[in-house]
Amino acid sequence: MAQVGIVMGSDSDMPVMAKAADILEELGISYEMRIISAHREPDEFFEYAKTAEEKGFKVIIAGAGMAAHLPGMCAAIFPMPVIGIPMHTTSLGGRDSLYSIVQMPTGIPVATVAINGGANAGILAAKILATSDSELLSKLKAYTASLKDGVVKKDQHLQEVGYKNY
Ligand code: RP5
């Protein structure tokens, strides 16, 4: 059984959604990834959202662009957390996606990450699961420590070579 459902409105969203999947794989979290359009195939979408709980999902990561109703409609049906990823768009720079996903009515929240924030969506899903999984929590603490180490190494390199040779 997959712990996380990853769903996107189109295959054009894949480069961003892949970053969420990469994080889940790195942390050993099982997931199912689907392309389902709430607008172009509403019946398939409803079947997906209505069966998500019985499939064992604890979190859904939903990404969409433009009039991005997929995450909000997942949240309307699925009773556990939904994380929304607004896609960057050429026409409105992703503000259309962002506003569509983040401005949910009271009672139906979508935890919205930044435009194209695929990696953070994966990390947030892991953090939600880690509230009841101490082994996963340890992995997340190690991941956070590795971020710090990365910055420390960059600063050390800067001090060694100076900014002109960085
Ligand atoms: C949305 O429309 C998708 O999530 C995608 O971000 C956007 C464009 O879809 P395509 O026209 O590339 O299929 O439903």
Image: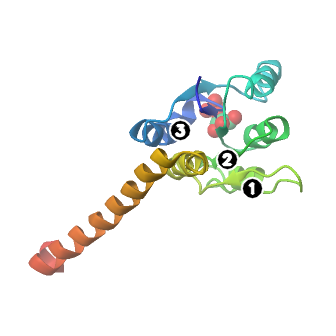
**How many tags in the picture?**
3
Ligand 1 found in image quarter? top right
Residue 58 vs residue 49, the one in the foreground: 58
Question: Which residue is located at x 67 percent, y 54 percent?
Answer: 112
Quick one: SS at disc 3? helix
Left or right: residue 65 versus residue 125 is right
Quadrant where the N terminus sits is: top right
Q: Which residue is mark 1?
A: 102
Label 1, secondary structure: give it: helix
Q: Residues within 10 Å of mark 3 (few under 14, many from 20)?
A: many
Left or right: 13 as drawn, with respect to 23: right
Q: Which residue is mark 2?
A: 84
**Amino acid type at mark 3:** Met
Between 110 and 103, the one lying in front of the other is 110
Dot 2: element: strand
Dot 1 or dot 3, earlier in sequence: 3
Type of amino acid under label 1: Val
Q: Quadrant of residue 42?
A: top right
In the rendered image, residue 111, in percent from the top left (x then y), is placed at 69, 53
Label 2–label 1 contact, CB within 8 A: yes
Asked where in the image residue 149 lies, by quadrant, the reply is bottom left
Cα distance, mark 1 to mark 3?
Answer: 18 Å
In the displayed structure, 70 sits above or below 101; it is: above
